Amino acid sequence: MYRYDSYDQKIVDERVAQFRDQTRRYLAGELTDDEFRPLRLQNGLYIQRHAPMLRVAVPYGLLSSTQVRTLAHIARTHDKGYAHITTRQNVQFNWPELKVVPEILAELAKVEMHAIQTSGACIRNITSDPFAGVAGDEYIDPRPWCEVLRQWSTFHPEFAFLPRKFKIAVNGATQDRAVIQCHDIGLELKRDAAGEIGFRVLVGGGMGRTPIIGAEITDFVPWQHIITYCEAILRVYNRYGRRDNLYKARIKILVKALGIAEFKRQVEEEWAFGKGGPNTLTEAEVARVATHFTTPAYETQPADDAAYASQRAANPAFAAWARRNVLAHKVPGYAVVVLSLKDPSRAPGDITDAQLDLVAEWADAYSFGEVRATHEQNLVLADVKQSDLFAVWEKARAAGLATPTFGLLTDMICCPGGDFCALANAKSIPIANAIQARFDDLDYLYDIGELELNISGCMNSCGHHHVGHIGILGVDKNGSEWYQVSLGGSQGNDTSIGKVIGRSFAAAEMPDVITNIIDVYRAQRLEGERFIETVRRIGLDPFKIGVYGDAAIIERKQHA
Amino acid sequence: MPKLIKNGSVIDDAAQILVLDETQAPEALSLPEGQVFVPLAVWQAHKGVLSDNKAVGVWLESHESVDDLAEDLDSLSAVALNFPKFTDGRAYSGAALLRTRYGFKGEIRAIGDVLRDQFFFMQRCGFDVIQPKTGKYSDAQLEEALASLKDFSTPYQAAVDQPEPLFRRARRAA
Ligand code: HEM
Ligand code: SF4
């Protein structure tokens, strides 16, 4: 992974000093709340229900074991013993005290970490495929490009006060695992006919209250020009994005208002000036960054380890975990392990300090000292030998990190919701836990198969409910908490926005509602058909009947 | 006399920013003595007479475009860009465009809600004069605030103050 040189380190150290002084001036009354707010946000600091929440950047989800140990230490000493993995591969602490935040940042800086631009109206953490470098379907490793873009966007002086936040994701595999269609800029690595690397660029995707799928602005920008191209997009957005209404300030609204053709015309007119300028990437720079992402020293292993096969045969629980949470690796004899953060006794995505320390230990012992954070709020050991899988499983199981449900209904994405978040309409964690409790039978879950269930506590959509096969959204009705359900959303290659099925439900109804939806699926599915495919084939009506009964549908039809 | 920051030091400055209220039409021109920045509308209405007067600069509101000054820059020695709120970042692009696209060599002044925690970004985008609101900082605080110009010593990306990105400026070891 990328290691800082003296320049990177200096920038992060100077940031710590800057923020320390800003915090001091705020606490001394020299900075008003309004003046301090964007400063702390650009350092990932929200003021929440209970305390500030600190979001630490994990560039494109990559962590070293040393960094994981530091996160454990912070969780232990400055928080209540846990941390939270976010959908953008970052780490959040829910309880730090403002006055110790500079101290936390200083500790992070010692292990090449920071909280720069993890929030605020600026270019945020660049996210990517959590299986970058190890996935069989990868054709170009996105990580060096993410790092190049990270450096370019860090303290970019022109784009620190955009109309609204700005998120970039990069994918370089056949399957999109970076959700590029739901980002302000989504970059898909590709090669042109001559074999040259470049990017297909999507723009104007996003969740929030107006979910929009990104539109293609160009089908190929040669790699040398990706920074100048992004700068052109950002400059047009910075100058013409709406600033009069917070809810209409994202780039997606500008792209929609202008139309993609006109937006593209403006961007390319701007780009004509920047193209070929000093920000044009050089082969030397890309090569320098890429040397940080070379393949680790894999050993020659049999493609199918005999002991691994017999361990699975002998131990059904291990076999179940191996089937769900162990994924194919491009190198024979190696595997990718998903460490599940979806133990039903914890909030989805939460991990304790002790667990973090263990993960660091396993990373060192079994996976070249690296860990990844995923968009689905799990952790990954990306380079485990098949012959080590049993040992990893035993340890992970003992630590509560081996829930064998990766990609299934209970492996849900869930925002912090009303338990932590001041913006929430409703709690989301108890709903997640109630659904996990209802669907605790593994055979039943396996029978249901792949299913993405996403929960957000309000329209800001931090839990990506719009693109969940099943989406749950907390809504406020006369001061009490209700939940709206949508079906048919999807992320990845065939991204779609889910449709609401009807009136919302009380918290206590939610497990039954999900059961009813699943019953309809199981009754209607064709052989081998995944949940999302069934929804797409039969439409919403059978599900509405399953959930609300015939009467609701007939009544609606008569009104139509 | 009000103080501001010019090229990294605190100096006295007497320039006035002419703001029209609702009753004043840009067509009616009455200029105060000394250096003055007039609104874009006033400039456009009186370009002919004003362009010989080196004491006159133009100031733009954040929604006004520097492109509209492109033809006039040869006759201007100073342009001020207003930050109605410090979170309105349009003037950063405006200043960068004036310097890079239009090659403007005169003064570019940041006015309005100008706070020390943004000085560094302003300077990088080509502002050479930074003018916090009168009374925002005491003289001592303004001196102290000069430190913010140096928040970061070696930025990554190219900008007006440093037209080469780090990867072209430095030989970085892999
Ligand atoms: C608890 C404190 C949090 C607050 C106050 C908060 C606030 C917000 C707000 C206001 C938005 C809407 C922005 C917009 O539409 O322009 C948003 C979107 C989002 N947040 Fe959060 N959030 C919080 C926690 C989280 C967490 C824990 C995650 C990850 C699990 C997360 C991930 C996201 C994502 C992915 C989006 C959607 C981005 C998009 O619209 O494309 N947030 N958040
Ligand atoms: S979706 Fe709403 S409730 Fe959930 S974290 Fe985001 S802002 Fe808070």
Image: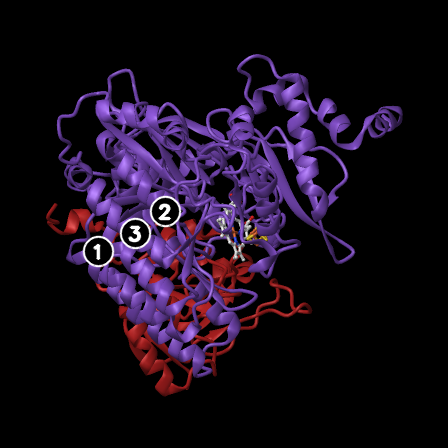
Chain colours: A purple, B red
User: Of the numbered discs in the image, which one, if any, rests on residue A358?
Assistant: 3
> Mark 3 to mark 2: distance in Å?
11 Å
Residue highlighted by disc 2 = A398
User: Which type of secondary structure does the marked residue at label 1 adopt?
Assistant: helix
Dot 3, how many residues are within 10 Å of its Cα: few (below 14), some (14-19), or many (20+)? some
Disc 1 marks a residue whose amino acid type is Asp
Residue in the foreground of this view, choosing between A76 and A188: A76
Q: Quadrant of the N terminus of chain A?
A: top left
Identify the residue at the far top of this view.
Answer: A527
Q: Is label 1 or label 2 in front?
A: 2
Residue in the foreground of this view, choosing between B21 and B84: B84
**Could you say where residue B161 lies in the image, as x and y percent from the top left?**
26, 58
> Mark 1 to mark 2: distance in Å?
38 Å
User: Of the numbered discs in the image, which one, if any, rests on residue A373?
Assistant: none
Residue highlighted by disc 1 = A8
Q: Is residue A477 above or below residue A531?
A: below
